Amino acid sequence: MNINRYISRILPVLLAAFLVSAMAISDEKEEILDIHNTVHCGNCHSMNSKISSTGEIPGRSATCQNCHDPLKSSANYFGFSFHDDPTRNCTDCHSFHKTDVIKAKESRFSLEFYDNSKMYNCVACHNKNSSPDQLSAGHQQASLLYHSDSLYTQKLSASENCLVCHGFNSTLNVKNSSSAKIPFINLHASHPNEVIVEKGYKTGMRNIKVNIDEKLKLLDNRIECLTCHNLSAGSNKLLAQFDSQKELCSGCHIRVQNSNSFVIAN
């Protein structure tokens, strides 16, 4: 088949799939905004406050929970560390009227949290097992990119965001902001990432455990850099906490009988 004819046939299909996905996320966002617009002002604002002030009533997190179940929210699913802070209120970070805007200290940025795949970038530093304070100087510098240019990073997968700095083809200036030598990843000689992991998958020499170790997190059933690496681990190569690298491998892979090798993933 002529390549131009093939492209002309497949391109509309890919474009349609992209538009359907984008419309689904947009529809979910609009639905949330529509629901918020039906809430009476007095539910969140005090009648005694000045017009120019926000005047949220005390216990505003409790007010949010009148509609939002924290146990069913993405906040609970992803286990973000800042949601465990009892001194925080929902509106410290979230805006009722601008639901896609997040406040982080002195900065504000947009976050498409309607799409779970965008949230994995946050999990890299903000999770219950680590703190941004434990990040290396280089990763703390790199974190500025996530907050200052979130619209760019949200277009990338979790592993692609790692490769912005660690990929051989990276040209980002943030590489030069740290005195430490940055390791570069050769994708042809590294463990595959962004690959769907089918638990219990067995065929020839490619066997995966049914029960993968809970320390190895799959992202939407995909193996990503963050599956095996923990940015705040403090261990060699920032690997997830296992007694040895072999034990880390055996978290997913079934060891070949009478061998020190592991079968490889599909």
Image (cartoon, rainbow, N blue to C red):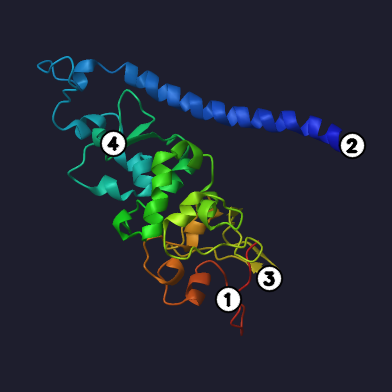
Please tell me the numbered disc located at residue 205: 3
Residue at which label 4 appears:
93
Residue at which label 2 appears:
2
- Name the mark nearer the viewer: 4 or 3: 4
Q: Do the residues bearing badges 1 and 4 touch, measured as CB atoms within 8 Å? A: no
In terms of sequence position, does the residue under pointer 4 or pointer 2 come before the other? 2
- Mark pair 4, 2: CA separation: 53 Å
Image quadrant in which you'd find residue 53: top left
At x 58%, y 76%, the residue is 255
- Mark pair 1, 4: CA separation: 45 Å
In terms of sequence position, does the residue under pointer 3 or pointer 1 come before the other? 3
At x 56%, y 59%, the residue is 199
Q: Do the residues bearing badges 2 and 3 touch, measured as CB atoms within 8 Å? A: no
Q: Nearer the viewer, residue 4 or 26?
A: 4
Label 1 neighbour load within 10 Å: few <14, some 14-19, many 20+:
some
Please tell me the numbered disc located at residue 255: 1
- Mark pair 3, 1: CA separation: 10 Å
Query: Looking at the picture, which amino acid does disc 1 mark?
Result: Arg
Q: Look at the picture and state if 136 lies above or below 71.
A: below
